Image (cartoon, rainbow, N blue to C red):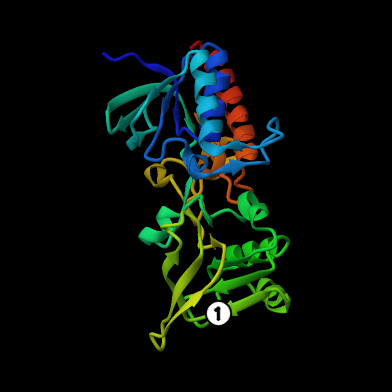
Amino acid sequence: MAEIQNTVILGSGCAGLTAAIYTARAGLKPLVLEGHEPGGQLSITSLVENFPGWPDGIQGPELIDNMKKQAARFGAAYQLAHLVSVDLSVCPFRLTTSSGEIRTHSLIIASGASARWLGLPSEQALIGHGVSSCATCDGFFFRGKEIAVVGGGDSAMEEALFLTRFATKVTLLHRRDAFRASKIMLDRVMAHPNIELRTSTVVEEVLGVDEHEVKGLRLRDVKTGTLSELPISGLFLGIGHEPNAKMFAGQIDLDADGYVRTKDNVFTTHNGEVVEGVYACGDVQDRRYRQAITAAGSGCMAALEAEKFLEEHGH
């Protein structure tokens, strides 16, 4: 029979790797499943300037690589696999992965949330080169420039308002002729002198692939079919995130949008009762902040709780 793991960590972004560092230093020899997006959203982020300890900033992939090496130094192991299904009704927990079955005494869910993208080849080619899904992460780089935000809900409104701190003009694009955002948020956006709203408009192409930086957008009016170009330096997607937690539905509590519900920051629940030995951290349970440092902090908390649980149960 295969060895039963002390703890398995799902995900290798800031939350998962911080949990790996702490559990590895505790001698638990954690196994990290790197998931379908190894490194999480930081792996597609260019310069990170708001992570403490890096006064000149650090490239996102480099920060992730440093954290991975740090956890490995203390005994963390990595497996390039993703979770297919899970059974939390048995102890140890049973995980079916793309590389086979794993059993574990504790589980830390750090599988993150994937940004929703438009799915355009030009958009994907320019992620990290002017295309972003995080205004608080990347807005600073567009000081004094004109940019666009795509979306029609409160998230898009918040992104647009935040970005006016840096950009000289923000064009908010929405495919429908009416916004679904709350009235108070829409009123704030409409009242802002540096935000222009364009409805019934979709992005056909992000311009600047050959130059490796966003130069503009090719837009299409969905009512008339008319094409036009909008010269901008940055494109922000405000169409939400998709938490990577669907495989846990029915076994732990998820909210209406699929985020893991937690009690006291990291404890998972089922029908409102704490699920012992299963913890969640990072963007899979955080719909509010979604920052590298908050993910790391919750990864630390999850690791400390897992360590305490294993000690109490003699593992």
Q: Which residue is mark 1?
A: 198
Please state the horizontal and vertical placement of residue 179, each as a whole percent of the image: 56, 77
State which quadrant residue 181 falls in. Answer: bottom right
For residue 102, above or below residue 238? above
Please state the horizontal and vertical placement of residue 96, each as a whole percent of the image: 30, 31
Q: Observer-nearest residue: 312 or 59?
A: 59
- For the point 30% across and 32% down, which residue is it? 97
State which quadrant residue 248 falls in. Answer: top left
Q: How many marks?
A: 1
Please state the horizontal and vertical placement of residue 232, each as a whole percent of the image: 56, 67
- For the point 33% across and 32% down, which residue is it? 81
For residue 170, above or below residue 139? below
State which quadrant residue 14 falls in. Answer: top right
- For the point 29% across and 15% down, which residue is it? 2
Q: Residues within 10 Å of mark 1 (few under 14, many from 20)?
A: some
Q: Is residue 314 left or right of residue 56?
A: left
Q: For the N terminus, which image quadrant?
A: top left
Please state the horizontal and vertical placement of residue 117, each as a whole percent of the image: 44, 58
Say if residue 265 shows up in the picture: no
Q: Observer-nearest residue: 15 or 216?
A: 216
Say if residue 218 shows up in the picture: yes
Q: Say what secondary structure mark 1 lies in.
A: strand
* Outermost bottom residue: 224
Q: Observer-nearest residue: 226 or 100?
A: 226
For residue 104, above or below residue 200? above
Q: Observer-nearest residue: 87 or 74?
A: 74
For residue 148, above or below residue 131? below
- Kind of residue at badge 1: Arg
* Outermost front residue: 211
